[in-house]
Amino acid sequence: MGGLDVLLENDEIPAHDVTLAAFWMDQVEVTNGMYNLCVQAGVCRLPVKLNSDNRGDYFGNPEFQDYPVIQITWFDANVYCQWAGRRLPTEAEWERAARGDDLRTYPWGGEPPNELNSNANNIVGDVTRVGSYPAGASPFGVLDMAGNVWEWVADYYSGRYYTESPSTNPLGPDNGGLNFLRVIRGGSFQDNLFNLRVSNRGYETGPDPSAFPGEAEYYGRSSVKIGFRCVRAD
């Protein structure tokens, strides 16, 4: 786990061995149609906004039901995964599913992102239907782990975490009551080869537990570039 190529950043070092318990990961990102089932069940909130980057009518439009749900906060992604009998992946689980055993730079190998292996570099200009890039599959057959949308994972973010993380089933740093940043992984349709690397670590503001329900801070931030997928224990 961690940066092994010339583009590595300080928060990706040191590279280190990690042992994980077995898990299953969703093959594709959670879609509008999948998430809407949770909304209709009265458990999940609607996305913060219903548009995508260039589509005013996105969530709830049957044309895009197989596209990744976006405009979802970390709070809402966590609620969905629990409703579905799963959970958000840890950062280590996410990287394991994307990287496999051969220390590759991207889920598909060493070749930079292109129009055949990923929705990136703003070539399409918006999100695409999940699973549209089979050439970009990870060694375990997981799709869209680079490009399309960033993906929430369970962990709080710390740029120094790899210097102190445990070697078995790391769960991320404690938030200390002040850090509300949550890790995002994988890059988006707007990002280039740097952010699509399997070791790259992004972050966005997650829930602030000191806020009141109904306040935006209680749920955290959302984006047209962030979605998620779930995992379950073996």
Image (cartoon, rainbow, N blue to C red):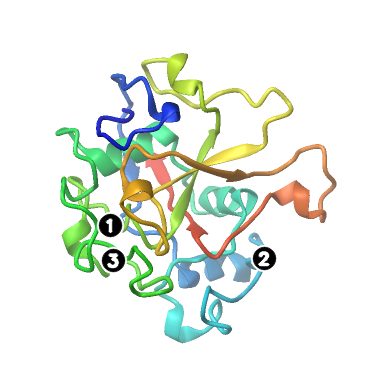
Circle 3 residue: 131
- Pointer 3 and pointer 1: residues touching (CB < 8 Å)? yes
Residue 227 position, x and y percent, is 49, 58
Which of 127 and 142 lies nearest the eye of the viewer? 127
Q: Is residue 152 left or right of residue 106?
A: right
Identify residue type, mark 3: Gly
Q: Report the Cα–Cα distance between label 2 and label 1.
A: 25 Å
Identify residue type, mark 2: Val
Q: Report the Cα–Cα distance between label 3 and label 2.
A: 24 Å
What residue do we see at 32% from left, 43% from top? 24
Which of 205 and 92 lies nearest the eye of the viewer? 205
- For numbered disc 2, what is the local secondary structure? loop
Q: Earlier in the sequence, mark 3 or mark 2?
A: 2
Q: Is residue 211 left or right of residue 2?
A: right
- Pointer 2 and pointer 1: residues touching (CB < 8 Å)? no
Q: Quadrant of the N terminus?
A: top left
Residue 159 position, x and y percent, is 52, 27
- For numbered disc 1, what is the local secondary structure? loop
Q: Quadrant of residue 165?
A: top left
What residue do we see at 38% from left, 32% from top? 92
Circle 1 residue: 143
Does the image show residue 122?
yes
Circle 2 residue: 48
Identify residue type, mark 1: Leu
Q: Quadrant of residue 48?
A: bottom right
Q: Report the Cα–Cα distance between label 3 and label 1.
A: 6 Å
Q: Earlier in the sequence, mark 3 or mark 1?
A: 3
Residue 97 position, x and y percent, is 29, 41
* Outermost residue to the front: 6
Decide: is 100 above or below 112: above
Decide: is 90 above or below 115: above
